[in-house]
Amino acid sequence: MIALVDRALALNPSYARGWHISGLLRLWAGQTDPAIEHAERALRLSPRAEADQTSYLIGIASFFSGRFEEAVPRLRVAIEDMPTFLTAYRYLAACYAHMGLLGEARATIERLRAITPEVMVNYPLPFRDPRHRELYFSGLRLAVGEET
């Protein structure tokens, strides 16, 4: 898929949606820095189109890169724009937990529980890097008060 999107972007480098998709695919492949670069390019090309989803993508890529302080504002924007998007709450809580901000992490979990009782996900994540999956789950466990 990455090769196909790269080909589309070579044909039309102004295709904002293509840059967003490229960023998402690279995120799934574990390439966090290229994911951020491609998502930022999508935002530059089309600042209002899918800004919430692109902000979310950049937030997750920053989270997986260990740049939690950069991830928080991106994830908060995603939540503000998509208040029922459960996954953004989970990443924000995990991010706060890894930053040692357990009060904020638990408050985010409470906001999530007001929408759904399911805090931990029970479906396969698309991320190929097992360290990314463990970072996410360990952050969630910290946020809900479990030992990691």
Image (cartoon, rainbow, N blue to C red):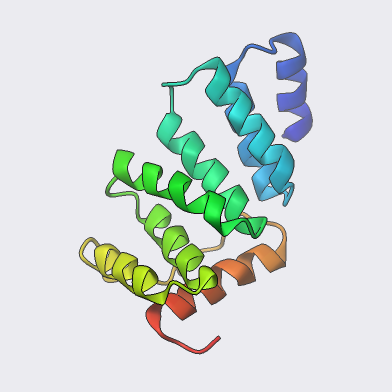
Residue 145 figure quarter:
bottom left
Q: Which of 54 and 115 is in front in this view?
A: 54
If the image is split into quadrants, where does the C terminus sit? bottom right
Residue at 26% over, 70% down: 110
- Determine whether 71 is above or below 19 in the image: below
If the image is split into quadrants, where does the N terminus sit? top right
Q: Answer whether residue 75 is visible to the viewer in this image.
A: yes
Q: Which of 69 and 120 is in front in this view?
A: 69
- Determine whether 12 is above or below 28 in the image: above
Q: Answer whether residue 118 is visible to the viewer in this image.
A: no
Residue at 66% over, 49% down: 28
Task: From the viewer's perspective, tell me whether residue 81 is left or right of residue 50.
Answer: left
Residue at 23% over, 61% down: 115
Residue at 72% over, 43% down: 33
Farthest left residue in view? 114
Farthest bottom residue in view? 147
- Determine whether 110 is above or below 144 in the image: above
**Looking at the picture, how far across and down is residue 83, in whole percent?**
27, 47
Task: From the viewer's perspective, tell me whether residue 88 is left or right of residue 28.
Answer: left
Count up the numbered dots. Answer: 0
Residue 39 figure quarter:
top right
- Determine whether 46 is above or below 1 in the image: above
**Looking at the picture, how far across and down is residue 86, in whole percent?**
35, 56
Q: Nearer the viewer, residue 89 or 116?
A: 89
